[in-house]
Amino acid sequence: DGTCKGSLKTNLSFLRRLVRNPSVIVGDTTTDLIPNYPDLTASPEGEMTCEAALAISLVQWLECSSQSGTLLDSCSIPSNWTVTARREGVSL
């Protein structure tokens, strides 16, 4: 499912759901396991979708531009280094 942990992508949430699946626990699995259990590949609860992240970013950008009266001049746009540091929990 591509969950990000720092700058790494992992399918950890899928694997957790997989090992808790009743058919997997009893060893009664076939090649149609995932089609029979679509919840295995569902997005984890609380995970923001790309669409939601884009919508929130757009709203914040519009709020910033409406407060300043310009689209970009008064809004502070962080560098890619700053964005990555914030995402990975590094304070600058």
Image (spheres, helix red, strand yellow):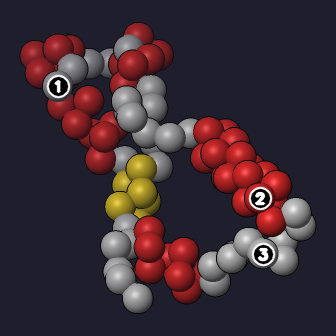
Q: Position of residue 36 (x, y in %)?
A: 41, 11
Q: Earlier in the sequence, mark 1 or mark 3?
A: 1
Residue 76 in the figure: left or right of residue 38: right
Q: CA distance from mark 1 to mark 3?
A: 50 Å
Distance CA(mark 3)–CA(mark 2): 9 Å
Regarding mark 3 in the picture, which secondary structure is present there?
loop
Q: Is residue 67 left or right of residue 35?
A: right
Which quadrant would residue 32 be assigned to in this image? Answer: top left
As drawn, the label of residue 20 is 1
* 25 up-or-down from 15: above or below: above
- Can you tell which quarter of the image residue 88 is in? bottom left
Q: Earlier in the sequence, mark 3 or mark 2?
A: 2
Residue 75 in percent (x, y) is at: 74, 72
Q: Nearer the viewer, mark 1 or mark 3?
A: 3
Mark 3 and 2 residues: CB-CB less than 8 Å, in contact? yes
Q: Is residue 89 above or below residue 60?
A: below
First reached walking from the N terminus: tag 1 or tag 2: 1
- Residue drawn 84% across and 77% down? 73
The C terminus appears in which quarter of the rendering? bottom left
Type of amino acid at the residue the image marks with label 2: Gln
Residue lying at the far left of the rendered structure: 26
Percent position (x, y) of residue 72? 84, 71
Looking at the image, residue 11 lies above or below residue 46: below
Which residue is denoted by mark 2 in the rendering? 67
User: In this view of the protein, which residue sits in the foreground, 34 or 56?
Assistant: 56
Label 2 crowd bin: few (<14), some (14–19), many (20+), radius 10 Å: few
Residue found at the far right of this picture: 70
* Element on which disc 1 rests: loop
- According to the picture, the residue beneath numbered tag 3 turns out to be 74
Specify the amino acid type for callout 3: Ser
- The reply, left or right, for residue 73 in relation to residue 60 is right
